[in-house]
Amino acid sequence: MDSATNNQASSDSITQLSQTIRASGIELGFDVLKIAPAISPPGYHPLIEWLTNGYHADMDWIERRQAAYEHPNGVLQNTRSVIVVALNYHNEDSLEGEFRISRYAHGSVDYHSVLRKRMKSLTRIMRDIAPQEITRAVVDTAPLLERDFARLAGIGWFGKNTMLISREIGSWFFLGAILTTAELQYDAPFKKDYCGSCDACLQACPTNAFPEPGVLDANRCISYLTIERRTRPVDESLRAGMGNWVFGCDVCQEVCPWNRFAPSQSPSEFHLRDELRSISLETLLRLDDGEFQKLFKGTPLERTGRDAIVRNAAIAAGNQNKGSLRPVLTSLLSDSSPIVNDAAKWALAQLAPD
């Protein structure tokens, strides 16, 4: 067999595998699947600058692994292609009332498990066709700049709120990536920015967490404060801006005009749980460790833990001047957690006199 024939056979193999991956991804329920080459991501040097400015707050694991972000080889050696999948979590359900939880955490399970299950099904299909190739599926736990590869694959652009935005489905979606040693057919990168002069997301942020368009200061971000800052008090100057958010924040996505294109249906695992419809802010404030596990085990809130969620609930109570919660807030002054004590004391000081 001559070299031209070998090259044609190789090209046919790449085409077949790429077409199978794209078709299988849609059959598995992903809203979008696109493919990018494994290169050093354009966002690597901005990441280093972001870390240097201290915008990562105390998320020290990002800094410890910063060298691995420079190329997908930091996650899987000899990676040649990055398959990026998007899965919508937006639906018509909403949680409005005494407290709010970010929409992505409304469901009964952690989104990581939902994406991994579908992605592993895809990697099995790939192994059947190309058993000599190595694959690894990751969902925001590995040192990989998924947004960069999503843009390189043509899924969308970075909004001024740093979210990846798709013209077709907005920004209410999860990203996953499959790294593979296989060479594939690549999609064209997304080069345009469709935000234009709109800065609704920047203006709406309650804690002014964007020092400039496209840059997020996690120290001031409500999502960071309520989810990742698990063992320390929230700075008092930021508490009023947290409003009634007890886990995450959706404000910058809620005001984004592109989210009018977000699908109204999502996998059932992401639908609002009945338990969240029925519980009150007082219920959250009274949670002990066992009750917290019973209510949130297996959901994104589990990792944040009982103490941080009760702390956030106390801040929400203070922001809403919930005088009816004075007794339970008073009881939390003797809670075993210092961050709960601190938040309860602050909340009581916000309440109007009886």
Image: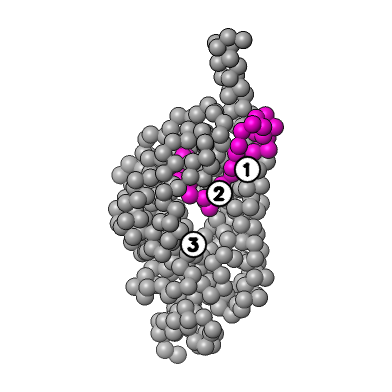
Q: Residue at x 62, y 72 (%)?
A: 292
Queried whether the magenta region covers residue 82, the answer comes back as no
Label 1 secondary element: helix
Write down the quadrant of residue 148 in the picture.
top left
Q: Label 3: few (<14), some or many (≥20) within 10 Å?
A: many
In this rendering, would 261 be left or right of 218? right
Q: Nearer the viewer, residue 55 or 333?
A: 55
| Residue hosting label 3 | 248
Quadrant placement of the N terminus? top right
Q: Give the residue type at disc 1.
A: Met
In this rendering, would 84 be left or right of 299? left
Residue 37 in the image: x percent, y percent? 48, 33
**In the image, which residues are magenta?**
122-150
Closer to the chain start, of discs 2 and 1, is 1
Tell me if residue 5 comes above or below residue 81 in the rendering.
Answer: above
Q: Nearer the viewer, residue 103 or 257?
A: 103
Quadrant placement of the C terminus? bottom left
Closer to the chain start, of discs 2 and 3, is 2
Q: Residue at x 68, y 41 (%)?
A: 121
Give residue 139's mark. 2
Label 3 secondary element: loop
Tell me if residue 342 comes above or below residue 99 in the rendering.
Answer: below
Q: Are marks 2 and 1 in contact (CB under 8 Å)?
A: yes
Tell me if residue 308 comes above or below residue 31 in the rendering.
Answer: below
| Residue hosting label 1 | 119
Q: Residue at x 57, y 40 (%)?
A: 178
